[in-house]
Image (cartoon, helix red, strand yellow):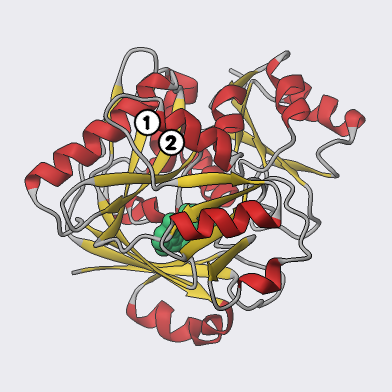
């Protein structure tokens, strides 16, 4: 029998882990990467390298896949639509479009009963920025609505530095109130038309807006745990998710939860599931796509996942000796670039 074929848009570390999981499940992978050297290169069965808007390559990619998924949400809308007109895309282009624009995403999240985000305002000029900053107690984060990741396209704004932004062109920006959260957590949901499962909430530590460490389980009380799972299921259901969705949340001092953002793909804070769950986030994504089913993750033991960032990669041999280390095979070390991660029980 012919192997089932999965097309993956993007070839970074998430794509690489998808390919590895696919191999274990006898699924053929075809990666479409817009960079020449990419993490998934040595793990996929075949690949295309071109700009995503290369019509000829896009057509070949679509034709060679049974189903298609993404490992980055930053893919132009018309390309998602083109794919979806020919093959089933996991998750849908609607979900990807909501999550690739912070304004759309915040409007959508706040429209769900029982779900809220931080206060935010759309910014179109410097006067807007000034006024909004005042209403947010003079501490806020300016974020580009699209294409940001790992804190890219974000600026902390206060009275002290606001004048530096006077000459800027404010196309597609929002300002968010800078909040003092107690903790950051995330929940990953996998859903088909028939069933939804969630991975338990994990605790995330960020430095310079980039994820450093994830701990399973999050040190939160039972009520908060249930609330986080309830919110995640509510969002996934409202989106009619088929596939996987990560939901990043802030736990506030008063024990309320605000949703930070959603990501319609496997998530860095779910990498612990590769070693410490019976079914990893990648296994469940593949089951959702090819079997229309998802399985309860069945965590095995308490653990931590630590990202290896920039020059830390030079200590790779230490990590290999002491932990379970995953190399992302990046072409070069860059400051604040995720180069790999390691996990250990705790
Ligand atoms: P990215 O798409 O880069 O992950 P996020 O919006 O998740 O962007 O921001 C990255 C990190 O910055 C968050 O995980 C959190 O630590 C911090 N952060 C983001 N927004 C706020 C906010 N409104 N108040 C306080 N901290 C924030
Ligand atoms: Mg984030």
Q: Residues within 10 Å of mark 1 (few under 14, many from 20)?
A: many
**SS type, badge 1:** strand
Label located before the other in sequence (1 or 2): 1
Q: Is residue 266 above or below residue 219?
A: above
Q: Is residue 96 visible?
A: yes
Q: Is residue 161 above or below residue 230?
A: below
Relative image position of residue 19 (x, y in whole percent)? 56, 44
Residue plotted at (56% across, 55% down): 131
- Quadrant position of the C terminus in the picture: bottom left
Q: Say which mark, if any, is on residue 213.
A: none
Answer yes or no: do the residues labelled 1 and 2 have beta carbons within 8 Å? yes
Residue marked by disc 1: 190
Residue plotted at (29% across, 61% down): 181
Residue 296: image quadrant is: top left
Q: Say which mark, if any, is on residue 245.
A: 2
Q: Is residue 210 above or below residue 106?
A: below
Front in this rendered view, residue 168 or 279: 168
Residue 187: image quadrant is: top left
Q: CA distance from mark 1 to mark 2?
A: 6 Å
Residue plotted at (89% across, 36% down): 54
Q: Is residue 148 visible?
A: no
Q: Residues within 10 Å of mark 2 (few under 14, many from 20)?
A: many
């Amino acid at each position: 029998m012919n192997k089932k074929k999965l097309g993956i848009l993007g070839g970074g570390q998430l794509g690489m882990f998808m390919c590895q999981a696919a191999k274990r499940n006898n699924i053929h992978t075809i990666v479409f990467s817009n960079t020449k050297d990419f993490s998934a290169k040595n793990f996929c069965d075949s690949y295309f390298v071109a700009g995503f808007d290369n019509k000829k390559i896009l057509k070949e990619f679509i034709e060679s896949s049974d189903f298609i998924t993404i490992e980055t949400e930053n893919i132009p809308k018309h390309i998602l639509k083109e794919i979806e007109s020919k093959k089933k895309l996991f998750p849908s282009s609607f979900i990807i479009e909501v999550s690739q624009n912070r304004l759309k995403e915040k409007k959508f999240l706040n429209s769900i009963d029982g779900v809220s985000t931080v206060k935010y305002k759309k910014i179109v000029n410097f006067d807007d920025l000034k006024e909004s900053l005042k209403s947010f107690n003079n501490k806020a984060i300016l974020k580009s609505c699209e294409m940001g990741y790992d804190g890219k396209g974000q600026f902390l704004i206060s009275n002290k530095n606001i004048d530096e932004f006077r000459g800027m062109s404010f196309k597609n920006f929002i300002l968010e109130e800078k909040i003092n959260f107690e903790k950051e957590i995330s929940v990953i949901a996998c859903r088909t038309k028939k069933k939804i499962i969630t991975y338990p909430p994990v605790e995330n530590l960020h430095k310079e807006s980039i994820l450093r460490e994830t701990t399973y389980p999050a040190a939160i009380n039972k009520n908060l745990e249930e609330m986080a799972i309830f919110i995640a299921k509510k969002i996934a259901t409202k989106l009619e998710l088929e596939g996987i969705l990560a939901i990043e949340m802030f736990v506030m001092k008063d024990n309320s939860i605000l949703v930070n953002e959603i990501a319609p793909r496997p998530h860095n804070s779910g990498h612990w599931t590769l070693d410490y769950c019976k079914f990893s986030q990648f296994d469940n994504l593949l089951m959702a796509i090819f079997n229309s089913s998802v399985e309860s993750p069945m965590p095995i033991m308490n653990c931590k996942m630590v990202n290896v960032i920039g020059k830390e990669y030079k200590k790779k041999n230490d990590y290999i000796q002491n932990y379970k280390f995953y190399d992302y095979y990046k072409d070069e070390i860059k400051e604040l670039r995720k180069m790999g991660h390691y996990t250990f029980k705790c």
